[in-house]
């Protein structure tokens, strides 16, 4: 079992919320977060928007 902080994975958690999950679930959550970061970097923008993305207003 692995302890994770839900705040690290879900933006609607404003405070730390620790839960225990299986090692497999923790690995999938980490892989998903890495995949999202890689896609955001490849697109040139962050997942929360910003002014540097391909659809930014000029």
Image (cartoon, rainbow, N blue to C red):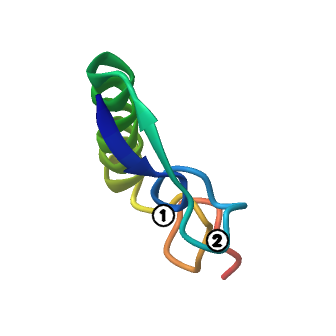
Which residue is tagged 2?
56
Q: Residue at x 29, y 42 (%)?
A: 34
Q: 52 or 34, which is in the foreground?
A: 34
Dividing the picture into quadrants, the one containing residue 3 is: top left
Image quarter in which the N terminus is found: top left
Q: Residue at x 30, y 17 (%)?
A: 24
* Secondary structure beneath label 1: loop
Nearer-N-terminus badge (1/2) = 1
* Horizontal side of residue 24 vs 49, given as left or right: left
Which residue is tagged 1?
46
Q: On screen, 50 above or below 2?
A: below
x%, y% of residue 28? 35, 24
Asked whether the residues under the numbered discs 1 and 2 touch, taking CB atoms below 8 Å apart as contact, a structural biologist would say: no
Q: Residues within 10 Å of mark 2 (few under 14, many from 20)?
A: few
Q: Residues within 10 Å of mark 1 (few under 14, many from 20)?
A: some
Q: On screen, 19 above or below 17?
A: above
Dividing the picture into quadrants, the one containing residue 11 is: bottom right
Disc 1 or disc 2, which is closer to the eye? 1
x%, y% of residue 35? 34, 36
Q: Residue at x 46, y 58 (%)?
A: 8
Q: Residue at x 35, y 50 (%)?
A: 37
Q: 58 or 22, which is in the foreground?
A: 22
Image quarter in which the C terminus is found: bottom right
Q: On screen, 29 above or below 40?
A: above
Q: On screen, 25 above or below 52?
A: above
The residues tagged by marks 1 and 2 sit, at their Cα atoms, a distance apart of 12 Å
x%, y% of residue 19? 49, 44
x%, y% of residue 26? 34, 31
Q: Which mark is residue 38?
A: none
* Secondary structure beneath label 2: loop
């Amino acid at each position: 079992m692995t302890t994770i902080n839900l705040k690290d994975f879900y933006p609607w958690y404003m405070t730390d919320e620790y839960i225990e999950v299986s090692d497999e679930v923790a690995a999938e959550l980490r892989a998903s977060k890495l995949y999202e970061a890689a896609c955001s970097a490849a697109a040139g923008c962050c997942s929360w928007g910003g002014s540097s993305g391909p659809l930014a207003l000029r």
